[in-house]
Amino acid sequence: MPGRWSIVLAIVPLLISCGDTPVEPAIAADVRAGEWRTWVIANGAALRPPAPPSNASAELDEIIAIQQSVTPAENAMIQKWNTLPTTAWHDLALDLFGFYWILLPDVRLATPARSARAFALLHVAMYDALVATWDAKYAYDRVAPVRADSRVRALVPVSDVPSYPSEHAAAAAAAAAVFTYLFPDEDTASFSALAREAGEARIAAGASYRSDVEAGYAIGRAVAAAAIERARADGSDAIWSGTVPDGPTAWRPTPPRNVEIPFDPTAPEWRTWVISSPSVFRPPAPPAMDSPAFAADLGELRQLSTSRTVAQADSARFWASESPSSRWEVFIRDEISRRDLTPMRAARALALASVATYDAMIACWDAKYAYWLMRPISADPTIKTVFSTPPFPSYPSGHSTLSSAVAEVFAELFPDAADYYRRKAVEASISRVLGGVHYRFDVTVGEHLGMQVGEAVVEWAREDGS
Amino acid sequence: MLTTTSLPPLDPQREGFYEAWAIDGAGRAHSLGILTPGIDNSLVSPVAGVVAVEVTVEPPGAPDDMPSAQRLLRAAIRGAVVELSIPGAVTQGDLPLHRQPGTFTMFSPSDNSWAGYPSHEESGVWLFNVRPRMTPQNDAWVRLTQLNTGWTYEGWMVRDFGTPDAIWLSYGKFVPDQSGAVSGRDDTGWGPFSGVLDFQTAGEEEFPGDDWISNPLNFPFPAALALPLDLREKNTAGASRWTHVITIEPARDRGEPIGMEQPFFMRPYHDPFGDGASDEPRVITFDDQSIPRARVVIGGS
């Protein structure tokens, strides 16, 4: 019986000898990012820490002492954190959700809606933590240790962004707390240890003072507290007390698992991030079972059952192997890396994309449980699906809604790749028909619904001060 | 004259015997006689108009005039020399066996997770991949060639593979779906040694595999092994003792008593298990050495 196992982040260290001093690149500073619109804290200045210590000599001495005896293992750790502050945590989330999704998915953690919720919570927390960090950075304009004292060596490239507070520490503390909230049955101590490692690595690298790191941790913890408080009140803990409706087109458990309670029937009540309510874009009712439209789309699935090509089945599987959120999280991770985004731009992109996926899922789930439409395999048990039909109503398609929404955000963030990602969204959408688990009208309506959600998030983004 | 290659002798009491058939233009099979592997077999067709030749594995007992469902080799007659192979006989259509089926995952188990750590990840093997993005197939499922109805795949963990003392542990029989993905459970579900009493019906997985953790139902189990297994076990030379093997078995083997399974000779996939982490993708590689072939020389003496 499959179960859970420990997840190990596989990050290959780029070994640099301790004597090397990497060139310090000029990284766009996003000087006013501290004024960007936030999600869970009032604004970037709301968590501004006291000024850093005026006398840093003791802290500099600590860094110099550390750098005098850096072991290969310590250097590997330093290089491991020579990334965006969000990278390691994003990878960890992808690993964890990859696991939790593929086995059941776990109904407490990795349903489509809960996966999207978790990614959004993580990214929003890290983004807000960085906004607060940037506010303080330019309020105090502290010079990084490596620039303040020639005895300190830069063991990684260090930008000219002020060092106080540490953005790596802030993102780490926020992420570790959110992970602990989301995965209480995991090894939560490992999350804290990873956060400590992030801070220690930046100190040893010559990029941060210890007081930078401590201030970053404080900001991260405070942001996480606000994010978790919001999460605890977002409605996702509610116990469903409803009943599955009766009727000729009503959803019913589907083989082979025949899950009696569909996933997340309370999601239509969950709090959204950008759209004003889950039902604000609710689509009209699906075609009636005796309508030509229904018959045509059911007929398409019957035909696919006997004529589906291997390529069509593979496409269906590709989009079903991970949560729909995860596929798009991988896309944005790769875009961030390819484009070498700044920490603030990367965190903003992650937050916007994940908020779009979450709001899209809630809008979709609102419609699913407004109409309770049965799955194709219930309408015709002879239909052959590529994989098990997911245990929740059919109309509209979650993959279609989510993918269209996030593709609009991608188009805003990466205009030169807009067409590519919009095509990806269509591919994801159609894959559900090819898999035999959705009627074509499910995906068509889902695409439209997702587009509306995506446009709402884009509108939010255009006014976030960035 | 029919000459075979990589066709080992069968145990007549357990596995049966080989028989050659002439296929006429109407698709009817006519026996050419029982085959003896390793020698040249002189065969005389009882009919004219032969369009194909097949070799089957017939079940133990007296021969009859009908070929079994275990069609092993086949070739259309084109010219004086005909090469027989398994596509179209063992596999559907003319499909060859997959040379790159993908990757799979070691992990377990029945006793971790919500019941608490530590668990026994090293004691189970599952034919799917938890890291779809890291796999050639770009999804969770291994791909194998669809087989004709007379055959089934069977998965094994084998200790000391290739030696006289090899111990074969089956994790079940399975077949791929119509697209070639191994997307269904095997015939033993979670596995008789998973510690789960309703192992054949419990669970929801969509892939074959088993755990070897405990034996609460007292199935036959090799005395040389102790549960829970550590599939990363090494020999004194530091080499992995366990090998992952996928065989092709006569479908009539379905229903073999648990703990008494024995492998057929077709073993196209076998890889040392190694000592990687539980979620590290493990590659399945193809080896055609155990895949039978035959040659018919028409008119030969």
Image (tube, rainbow, N blue to C red):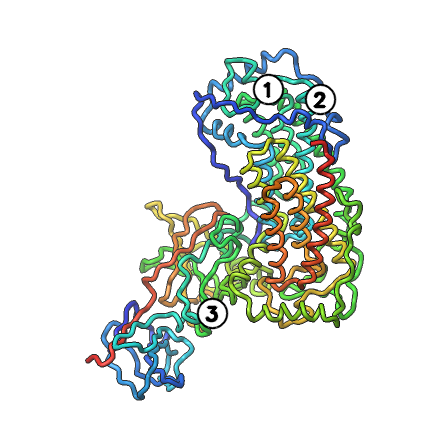
Q: Residue at x 71, y 58 (%)?
A: A445
Tally the marks.
Answer: 3
Assign the C terminus of chain A to one quadrant of the image.
top right
Q: Is residue B142 left or right of residue A257?
A: left
Residue B126 pos. (x, y %): 50, 56
Nearer to us of marks 3 and 2 is 2
Residue A209 numbered mark, or none = 1
Q: Secondary structure at mark 3?
A: loop
Asked if residue A184 shows in the view, the reply is no
Q: Are marks 3 and 2 on the same chain?
A: no
Q: Secondary structure at mark 1?
A: loop
Position above or below: A45 against A439: above
Between marks 2 and 1, how big is the CA–CA gap?
Answer: 15 Å
- Amino acid type at circle 3 is Pro
Q: Quadrant of residue A283?
A: bottom right
Q: Nearer the viewer, residue A106 or B183?
A: B183
Residue B245 pos. (x, y %): 41, 59
Residue under pointer 3: B257
Nearer to us of marks 3 and 1 is 1
Label 3: how many Cα within 10 Å (few below 14, some 14–19, many 20+): few
Asked if residue A455 shows in the view, the reply is yes
